[in-house]
Image: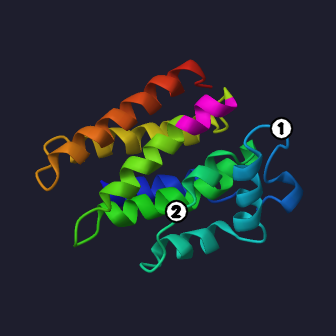
Amino acid sequence: MLESLRSEIKTYFQYRAKPCKQKLVVWDGFDELDKSSAVDFYSEKSWEDVLHHLQDPTVGNFYLEEWAVLGPQALAYYLHAYLEFLIETLSSQEGPNEGYVSELFHWLYQMIYMHKANPLNPQQTACIVKIAEHVIVEFQDYQRFPEIGEQISGNIGMFLQELVKYRM
């Protein structure tokens, strides 16, 4: 199942142009510090660069808060890295990075809530919904940390509820 999801991610997220620095955020007077941090982190980075950052075990910051304030084009472009890393962590021999999974779905919810829109096209949206449904099933009876399984399911539920409001 994970390889099928990875294939869909590649199909629906790979062929976007990297946003230029001026298109990373919309300077509208809100979340200025997060947007400044987003520009600092994402400037000149490809989605592959962000994926390599996420894969580095010595790095503790996923920059999800900064990702959520990116402009619509940049959100969808860099989401490719975050979804690839999600598939990697779900298929890890050591078990998934529960904190990352929980935070990703929290910030997916925030992305839609803050922008009052879904910046993803219908195919990307359908792909995200499939991934969310898979993660819910995977964490349904999570024994390692039962409370984190509940938190992940709650974050996914909030994300899917918000997504329904703005589904294309």
The reply to whether residue 122 is in sight is yes
In the depicted structure, whether residue 17 falls above or below residue 149: below
Quarter of the image where the C terminus is located: top right
168 left or right, relative to 17: left
Look at 30% across and 37% down and name the residue there: 153
Which badge, 1 or 2, is on the more N-terminal residue? 1
Tell whether 45 sits left or right of 4: right
Most frequent secondary structure within the magenta stretch:
helix
**The residue stretch that appears in magenta:** 110-115
Q: Residue 101: say if magenta.
A: no
Residue of label 1: 29
Write the residue at 51% across / 22% down: 164
Which residue in the structure is indicated by mark 2? 62
Q: Residue 30: x and y, percent? A: 77, 37
Tag 1: Cα neighbours inside 10 Å, few (<14), some, or many (≥20)? few
Instruction: Please identify the residue farthest to the front as the structure is shown.
Output: 33
Marks 1/2: CA distance?
Answer: 24 Å
Q: In the image, residue 14 lies at what x, y percent?
A: 62, 59
Residue type marked 1: Gly
Q: Residue at x 28, y 69 (%)?
A: 92
- Badge 1 marks a residue whose secondary structure is loop
Residue at disc 2, secondary structure: loop
Measured from the top left, where is residue 97 in percent x and y? 32, 62
Quarter-of-image position of residue 80:
bottom right
Find residue 139 and report its horizontal and vertical position in percent. Answer: 22, 46
**112 sits left or right of 128 in the view:** right
Q: Residue furthest top?
A: 165
Residue type indicated by callout 2: Phe
Vertical placement of 89 versus 57: above or below?
Answer: above
Residue 146 versus residue 46: which sits nearer the camera?
146
Badge 2: few (under 14), some or many (20 or more) residues near its Cα, within 10 Å? Answer: some
Q: According to the image, what is the colour scheme of the structure?
A: rainbow
